[in-house]
Image: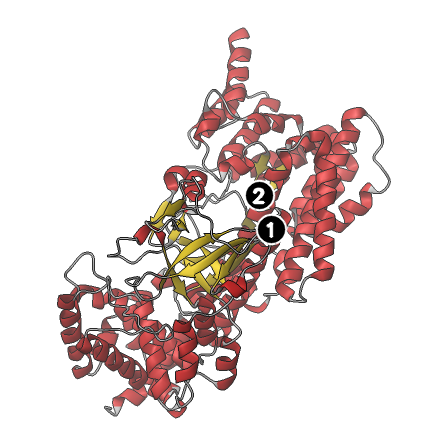
Amino acid sequence: MPAFFLYLSEVLYFVLDCVGVNTWVVKRRRDTFLHREAMWDVSSQLKGRDTTTYHFGSQSEGTTTPGLQSDTDMLITFNYWNIMYSMSDWQQGKANLLMVRYADTPPQHYLLQIYRPDLPLPVTHMDHPDFVTDSQGRVFLSNIFMVRPAAVAWGDAHLRRGPSNSGCEDEDKVFALKCNTLPYEIMSWFTKMGQAYWPPHETFEAAKKCVCFLVPDGYHGSVNKNIEWRITPNLIERLLMFSLNIVQIKCLVVLKIIKKQEFVKYIPHENCKFTTFHCKTALFFTLERTPPTVWTKNRLIECIVRCLQTILEFLNQGECPHFIVEGVDLFDGKLCRQCQLCLERAIRRMIQDDMHVLFHLQSDDLGQRLMVPPQEVRPYPGDDVNAAVCGKLARDMFDEYLRKVTDVCHRLCNNEEAELCINLDKNITMLKNLEINVAATGSHKNVIKFLLKSLMSIKASVISSRSIQSGQPLPRDIWQLYGESLNTDVVSSKLKLASMHFCQGELRRAESILIEVEFDLDNSVQSVCGCGRGLKNDKPSKTFCEYTVQNYSHGQLTKKLAFCVRFLREEKFCAPRFLWCEMYRAVGDDVDHRDSDERHWMDSAEMDARPFLLYLQYLTYRGLEVRHRQLEAFHRLNDILPSEDKVNHLYHPETVLSLYGHCCELEGDLHQALEAYNTSLGVPRNNAANWHKQRLELMLNNV
């Protein structure tokens, strides 16, 4: 290797530190996605669904950078199916599926024959669109049976790429079946390993306890493509990835960047591609035969070259073997022979050119950063990229939390109003039982506590709303419920409590809480919403990002998050009367034009915390006849309105414009109010401003 590789390796190592590839950010990524797995699992149990969710891929492994723009990959298993590798695995009362193969079934693929739940006998006839009968009368499960529900849920937004389904471009969900017995193609990997440098012994032993999955992905050229399922050892691969040291992770990240920017230039056929999984496979085989002493930061370039040489071997022999599953060629159906030869020539030139390609990498300005003297490259954790990564991880995690709360609320509100508190109690009891019985992991405990507080907040508000509606005093135990739910985040639960006091006519109590909220809601607080809307300025604030660098525990983060405030219809007497229209915002056939996310929250009044604070201040000080504070809130509300010359920083701009319009009405400026409502109508469909505009136009016509 050239002598300057030692120097360049240390510079590259340092530069990658600065763009989010370091032990500190990698751990943050992994912890975050383990939390998100726990969120999905707990919320599924609340729904009575027997599913388990896993996060795989670059985001959860920590093998990505902001410039790579990696997708979020999820695998969701349906555990009510019992997958049998042999008849000894049959279970009474379960939906049993036997893994079978024809003589010509491609490697890594199986068909799933349906067996009876009452007797260990195959089903011989079943008339269902998801079941397929072959010439021998055997009934198989189609691999598209999980696609139809996804297509219905996401509608026009539904995307299907191979085995994955999603409702957006940056998220891939694979619905799979769990196989508790490892088939021979995977078991053979354990028998052939032993003399290699890698993986570590403890990782190898842990891998033996893993399950594998069957994903709905038929072989590309098979006549039975619609009933074939591909076996995949994702959990074993994740264990292998989690065993990598930071040099090995950096090596893989650089391979991915080269693949994304350079390899694509040498693949002339549109249907061919060299994938991230090919890069990962090359790394695994290189690790297997390379002494651990090579994987050091001053030999990083050498490690990258060794991986490229492994890729060259694959291309030269025209086959890329799967590291774990026997008999699989990963080039098959992905990279034709012509493209393999083109890519082989390009990689040889890169190596012969002493890896000057690194200076031309544009992702994360990697090439430019390499040309900066090391002493001028900012180290982590102070680098802005690292702070931005941490801030986004934190914001997105709590966005996921709130989506789960939104989902729970939607499900509960589909029941009769009289049963809502009963159903809330059932869910609260279920969560408390889970808290006692669940495995003692921090992720699951934090999720359960968060959901408990959220449901208690809703229950307190529903009970208060009913008391205010009936003119009855609040129950004594209501304050315990409010107390247990006030710190879900920094302000939203407190704002709902202040709103309840306002609706009760207890303006001084409302004022006291609003003063506290205003003090807590400083510039370091980040807004988060679970409505599914993305903001044009999709970056957390700089102050919040800097805060998350040093404060990343669950409790510390909630002190700097402001959730949007939501009032369900059953809470409406705890909300200012003007907001009731938000709960019935649809006009005509508007409901039919809601997407899957909007159907979960648009029957509620939902608004960003900061503008609602100002609106509630305006109403409270108006009632207290403190005119200067009332006007101050009015002007500050005007200052945060969305406009053409400002980046949208609000999740619910249409509601904020309506709140401002109402304040204008109370100020007697009806024409300014009408302008605000008209501006609001330019944002989304399903807008309560329709009602306000009609009402105001009638008033103006009668003047």
What is the three-letter code of the residue carrying label 2? Asp
Image position of 363 with respect to 146: above or below: below
**Side (left or right) of 55 relative to 349:** right
Image position of 564 with respect to 361: above or below: above
Res. 523 in view? no
How many numbered circles does the render carry? 2
Residue on which disc 1 sits: 43
Image quadrant where residue 659 sits: top right
Image quadrant where residue 550 sits: bottom right
Q: Are marks 2 and 1 in contact (CB under 8 Å)?
A: yes
Point out which mark residue 422 bears. Answer: none
- In the image, residue 674 lies at what x, y percent? 49, 21
Who is closer to the viewer here, 662 or 343? 343
Q: Residue at x 43, y 37 (%)?
A: 643
Who is closer to the viewer here, 625 or 433? 433
Q: Secondary structure at mark 2?
A: helix
What is the three-letter code of the residue carrying label 1? Ser
Residue at the limit of the structure toward the top, as seen here: 702
Who is closer to the viewer here, 497 or 110? 110
**Side (left or right) of 325 relative to 32:** left
Q: Residue at x 66, y 51 (%)?
A: 451
Q: Quadrant of the C terminus?
A: top right
Who is closer to the viewer here, 159 or 59? 159
- In the image, residue 494 lies at what x, y percent? 70, 45
Q: Quadrant of the N terminus?
A: bottom left
Residue on which disc 2 sits: 407
Q: CA distance from mark 2 to mark 1?
A: 9 Å
Q: Residues within 10 Å of mark 1 (few under 14, many from 20)?
A: many
Q: Secondary structure at mark 1?
A: helix
Image position of 498 with respect to 192: above or below: above
- In the image, residue 184 lies at what x, y percent? 41, 73
- In the image, residue 77 lies at what x, y percent? 50, 56
